[in-house]
Amino acid sequence: MSKLISAVLAAAFAVATVSPVAFAQEKKDKAASSKAALEAACKDKKPGDTVKVDGKDVKCPAAKK
């Protein structure tokens, strides 16, 4: 019985340790695609103009120097 409990606790610890890494990876990929969509939407717009990206109203950023 104690071996079973130890195995379950070890598995739970492993999942809790690895899960945040998987979520961070997914969020990073989504941020990159969102940035590309924003750049495409703001291509012919002035800085400060509002565009719709992924269903949200977003202002175009100022051009980088």
Image: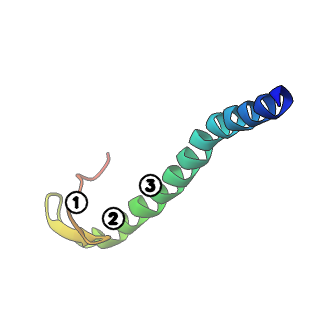
In the image, residue 54 sits, relative to residue 47, either above or below, namely: below
In the image, residue 12 sits, relative to residue 36, either above or below, namely: above
Residue 27 in the image: x percent, y percent? 49, 51
State which tag comes first along the sequence, 3 or 2.
Answer: 3
**Residue toward you, 28 or 45:** 28
Question: In the figure, is residue 13 to the left or right of 23?
Answer: right
Instruction: Kindly identify the residue that appears in the image at 48 percent across and 57 percent down.
Output: 32
Q: Which residue bears the numbered disc 3?
A: 31
The label number, if any, that marks residue 38 in the structure image:
2
Question: In the figure, is residue 57 to the left or right of 63?
Answer: left
Mark 3, Cα crowd under 10 Å, few <14 / some 14-19 / many 20+, is few
Q: Which residue bears the numbered disc 1?
A: 60
Q: Nearer the viewer, mark 3 or mark 2?
A: 3
* Mark 1 in CB contact with mark 2 (< 8 angstroms): yes
Residue 1 in the image: x percent, y percent? 83, 31
**Residue toward you, 36 or 65:** 36
Instruction: Kindly identify the residue that appears in the image at 40 percent across and 62 percent down.
Output: 34
Q: Which amino acid does label 2 sit on?
A: Leu
Report the Cα–Cα distance between label 3 and label 2.
Answer: 10 Å
Q: In the rendered view of the protein, which quadrant contains the C terminus? A: top left
Q: Which amino acid does label 1 sit on?
A: Cys
